[in-house]
Image (cartoon, rainbow, N blue to C red):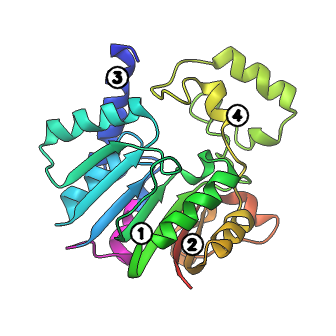
Amino acid sequence: MTEAQFLEGLSYAEDNFKNENAPHLHVDKKLIREKFDLTGKKILDFGCGMGGMSLWYATNWDCEVYALDIDGHHIDVAKSLQKKHNASNVTFEKRDVLETPLTEQYDMVFLNDVAEHIPLEILGKILSQLAFSLKKGGSIFVTYPPWRSPYASHLNHVIKTPWIQFFPQSYVEGLIEKHNHPLVGDLESDLKEAYHGLNKLTHEKIYKLASEAGLKVAYRKSHSIINRAGGPFKNINLRVWPFDFLVTKEFLQLQNK
């Protein structure tokens, strides 16, 4: 990771932390504030990335946050941001839970925009671990852009074309090659790796994996482009074809059966 990449990652993570209207997190933050009081809770931020949301939890509630990620570059940025803001109630760790399984239990587990990056067979194993790691009455809160989302390709910030994942793949590959550039991640080190690392996650897929892990869906919200109109459309959930192609992000609260 170059110094320029590090500074880019630091700026991105700090915006996710400090900006309540961060483009892909403002709905998440609003919903979390409405649904959960994290005061006094022990929190696991799984796949914490560069730590923006981990620090947001830690500084908005009097809680204990354990944040882990498999990518060492992400953790380096997160620890630097933690030091800058003197947040003592967060612990960041580079960790692969398949190699070093979780042993502690948590009141809340968050997976913010990470589930879509994990191969499905591995995601199932992780959900089983997380189910075992929940305290009684605890919850897992998962957010992700479903594969039918206009922005699910994770390319929209570079290739300004919604639903591009459904274009002919030879065309998409050509665009990625044209716009490819290094990323902060050690594992997903460029745009091409990031795109090919996506698991094409849908509600049906994660629901099946969650059920097999002994989890049930306690709450679901499907946020779509229509919700932006406000008024009577503010909280409507449009999940049936073809309106499901307008869903930009899914929010799931999972609990043990």
Reading the image, the residue beneath label 2 is 221
- Image location (x, y in percent) of residue 120: 69, 53
Q: Which residue is pictured at 41% across the width and 65% down the height? A: 109
> Which label lies toward us, 2 or 3?
3
Sequence-wise first label, 2 or 3: 3
Q: How many marks?
A: 4
Compared with residue 2, is residue 28 higher up or lower down, i.e. above or below?
Answer: below
* Gap between marks 1 and 2 measured at Cα: 10 Å
Find the magenta span and give its range: 29-40
**Mark 3 vs mark 4, CA separation in Å:** 23 Å
Which is more toward the observer, 36 or 247?
36
Q: Nearer the viewer, residue 167 or 118?
A: 118
Residue 12, quarter of picture: top left
- Ranked by sequence position, the earlier of labels 2 and 4 is 4
Q: Are marks 1 and 2 in contact (CB under 8 Å)?
A: yes
Q: Quadrant of residue 52?
A: top left
Indicate the quadrant containing the N terminus: top left, top right, bottom left or bottom right. Answer: top left
Query: Tag on residue 196?
Result: 4
Q: Earlier in the sequence, mark 1 or mark 4?
A: 1
Q: Amino acid at mark 2?
A: Lys
Q: What is the CA distance from the residue labelled 3 to the residue labelled 1?
A: 30 Å
Q: Which residue is mark 1?
A: 31
